[in-house]
Image (spheres, helix red, strand yellow):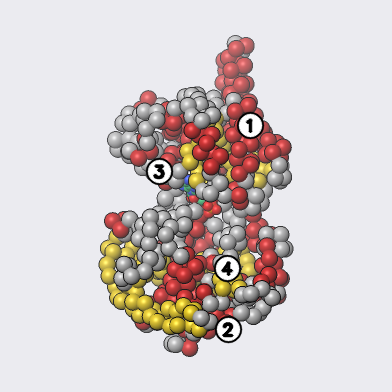
Amino acid sequence: MRQLEQGVAWPSPGTKFWEAPARSSPMPVDVGGGSSSVQPRDSRSLDVVHFTAELAPIAKVGGLGDVVHGLARTCLARGHNVTVIMPFYECLPQDQIEGLGFDMDIEVPKGKSWDGEIQLTTLKTAVYRGVIGGVPVILVRPADWDACNLFRGGRIYGGSYNELESYLYFCRAGLEYLRCSGQQPHILHLHEWQTCAAALLYWEVYSALGLYRPRVVLTIHNLDNTGECRQDEFAFTGIDGEQFATIERALDERTIGHNPERLNLMKGGMVYSNAVTTVSPTYAKEVLSGMQAGWLRSTLMRPEVNSKVRGILNGIDVEEWDPARDELLPANFSAQFPDGKALCKKYLQRGLGLDESPDKPVVAVITRLVPQKGIHLIKAALFRCLDKGAQFVLLGSGHCDGEFKAMAEQQFKDHKDIRLLVMYSESLAHQIYAAADIILVPSMFEPCGLTQMIGMRYGAVPVVRKTGGLADTVRDVDSHAPGEANGYTFDGTDEGSLHGALDRALTHFKEQRASWSEFCATNMNPRLALTHFKEQRASWTELSATNMNTELSWSRSSADYVALYNSIAMP
Ligand code: ADP
């Protein structure tokens, strides 16, 4: 430990320590197995164009940004030509876009409805090129930003612009760019409701305008938001929405008989795509069984839609999330060289002003604070940790963060075991994952979930509600063989169910330490004690090591996507 400590810039409690380097120079550890990101080259190279509202690391709000980035990067490494088309948000840090340069101006058809009539114009659009995190990007925005506020403001979502208008314009602009630049990608890979209109526009407009080769994949990352849109609002694409207002196409069935009836972009996206994926096999099952489909259930029940939906489990970017090389950490570690993790824990405890005890398990939650994430269970876990002598660290923000803000400022302001950080910080997230003994994800539903996987990569043990991708990635210690088991799961949405799993994890963590101190106290034969200590420790440490060694990279998932692309691509 002493050697590891050399060069560590120990933080002062109460400072924004995560904004400064944690050590004077990086000290990566030998990676051993489990970290390889070398990809096999695929025999056929495909041209893939993603349409997305988010791209990590600089345009990320949640998992969507991570997923598009990880998939794109891995497919590039497999030998495919991948480009990401995304909005040029005003809030993007332009100094982090490599080689940013102007590409071309294009005239993008755009309309608005006025007195029941569609008025058509064009909007001069500036297209830029660059590279974000190793991925080639095309960024589109109105050429004259002073004349309209599309994608303006300090945030990606919830800023000062009209999201529906902006994303409908974006879909049209992306396709118009492909047409003007004469490209014929094999695959248009769309993500979430924001880009669904591109599927409708491609098949109804652009396939007659010379863009003929692309086949369309839609990935649903979350069915919570599906993009409601009045027919007249669809005119922001420059096309009248009326032709899509049928039950077979994009009409929102709940609005039949209302004035006005509305379209649903996600429904249209599913209908107009050649293949639809969601981000884990269990979420796909939940969606297809109607359990998580909401009112889109009837659309998903249609055989022609049902048959093209499948679940492909997300991976994580194992280079971005690599405890052996992560330069944001005060010490690096791996399954083979785990010592740095203890230092990361001590560093975080000191920086956050927590009791610097290695014996108190750190339970971490890193999340958007929205109902999906199980707000009442996050709160219940906080109080359970308090009762059980564990530490609880929350990093999160979102529209349900009010109560946590209040608790952070009052009840738990200088608490020695609880820290509630109501904010977004990429670097603090890295440090919390590295310090965490337990990563908690008590979601009400979870299409895939990345935090349990990132936590595992950093040696934490996940405690999760068994839903969606959490059910696909976490196997309970008490019902799986050692080596296969990797965490704790629970089913119910009530506090009792959460307590059951959390308590088992906390007991597991504490038992090994208790038994060691018991041995010391009873002054047993030191040789026996040592064996016992090792055996006991092995259970938690082995679990942590198993998790760090788990294959979580995009290798497996990208192979599934490539197989899907090949199954629908034109020769
Ligand atoms: P979702 O996409 O529903 O938000 P995921 O678990 O799929 O949930 O992905 C969440 C991603 O966002 C992870 O990379 C996680 O580390 C990150 N994240 C969530 N909240 C924060 C935060 N407050 N600060 C930093 N990173 C965060």
Residue linked to disc 1: 384
Residue at position x 58%, y 55% in the image: 448
- Mark 2 against mark 1, which lies toward the viewer? 2
Tag 1: amino acid: Arg
- Say if 314 sits above or below 535 in the image: below
Q: Earlier in the sequence, mark 4 or mark 1?
A: 4
In this rendering, the label closer to the viewer, 1 or 3:
1
Secondary structure of the residue carrying numbered label 3: helix
- Label 2 or label 3, whichever comes before in sequence order: 2
Q: Earlier in the sequence, mark 2 or mark 4?
A: 4
Please give the label number shown on residue 243.
2
| Label 1 environment density (alpha carbons within 10 Å; few <14, some 14–19, many ≥20) | some
> N-terminal of the two: label 2 or label 1?
2
- Name the side, left or right, on which 146 lies relative to 517: left
Q: x, y percentage for residue 50?
A: 45, 69
Q: Is mark 3 within 8 Å of ligand 1?
A: no
Q: Quadrant of residue 85?
A: bottom left
> What amino acid is found at the position of numbered circle 2 in the picture?
Gln
Q: CA distance from mark 1 to mark 3?
A: 27 Å
**Cα–Cα span, label 2 and label 1:** 55 Å
Name which residue type carries label 3: Ser
Q: Please, is residue 97 above or below residue 32 in the view?
A: below
Q: Position of residue 199 (x, y in %)?
A: 52, 76
Quarter of image, res 210 = bottom left
Q: Mark 3 packing: few (<14 Cα in 10 Å), some, or many (20+)?
A: some
- Name the disc covering residue 228, or none: 4
Inter-mark Cα distance, 4 to 1: 40 Å
